[in-house]
Amino acid sequence: MSESLFSQRKQCPTCLSEKFSPLYECNFAAEPVRLYLEKAYGEAESFDIEKLKKTNYSLLQCQDCNLIFQEFIPSPALMLLLYENWIDAEKSLENRKRYGIAYYSLYSQDIAQILAYLGKPPADTKVLDFGMGWGHWALMSKAFGCEVYGAEISQRRIEYAKRNGISNIRWEDIPSEKFDFINTDQVFEHLADPQDTLKYLRKSLKPDSLIKISVPNSFGIRYRLKHMDWSAPKGSFKSLNPVAPLEHINCFYRQSILDLANSVDLVEIKIPISLQYKYTTVWDHPKRAIRNILIPIYRNILGLQNYYLFRPR
């Protein structure tokens, strides 16, 4: 293992158990993982698969909380290289600029539902978008009138958000602030130490506040891991995106998320289904209408969508 580029996790990053089972292992520089990485990052000039050949893509599953996690994870140096160089920032931004009304409406209704549940005027609501990316969720919150802060590791994304009026908050300054709501959307699957991060964020929650954790859907992941089709497109039923090498180093089941929250003294809450329907805004297509009807049921009753809200106990 290359000590400068990777570190090894010897316990479950969610519940800290040392009991886990191996699920899959393949060298990063060997097929089929190599083909996946070259397709994902091969256009970047700084990408070199040879840098990864001393390390294995190793998937483990915790026997206590069921979390699926990558044993060997990128070091901070490799993480910075990955997100600032290997991932094409300009291409990522241009792709998002082409998204339509339906994409942004999901942010709008998400924020509206949360504000309605909190029962506070937006102008009196202070929010943090942790891992804000290009800041689109943060910008939507600002449009509602909230006091908005963003936290992000990518300097390009920080500068973009600043140009659009989103205040950046440094990691070390987060505990000194108190927020009504913290948004973490597609963040915890990337974190080396999700428990430590959640414990840290909890310090900045007001007593009556909420934190959202939304991660890739693990539904059907056992089927996907059984077939290991690395060519399956993102969004398809065989897609391995929830366990994407290097990036998605944690794959959460419902139990692993609940155990994570419980470990830092957070308790799950659910926005009433009636309130979710009230603030669902776009019904422009039959598929969208069906989705709008089913999502609250998936979240509140079946627990099939990896979207969770927690408050301090």
Image (spheres, helix red, strand yellow):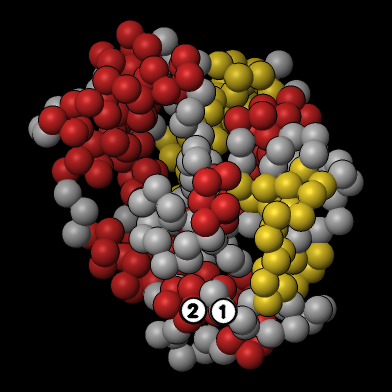
Question: Would you identify the image quadrant in which residue 91 lies?
Answer: bottom left
Using the image, tell me which numbered label, if any, was put on residue 31. 1
In the image shown, does 308 or 221 lie closer to the viewer? 221
**What's the residue type where badge 2 is placed?**
Leu
Residue at 80% over, 34% down: 64
Q: Is residue 105 left or right of residue 171?
A: left
In the image shown, does 223 or 103 lie closer to the viewer? 223
**What's the residue type where badge 1 is placed?**
Glu
Indicate whether 119 appears above or below 231.
Answer: above
Residue at 76% over, 55% down: 22
In the image shown, does 284 or 95 lie closer to the viewer? 284
Indicate whether 26 appears above or below 114.
Answer: below
Label 1 with label 2: CB-CB less than 8 Å = yes
Tell me the quarter of the image containing the C terminus. top right
Task: Return the residue at label 2.
Answer: 35
SS for dot 2: helix
Give coordinates of residue 103: x percent, y percent: 25, 44
Residue at 50% over, 38% down: 219
Q: Residue furthest left?
A: 284
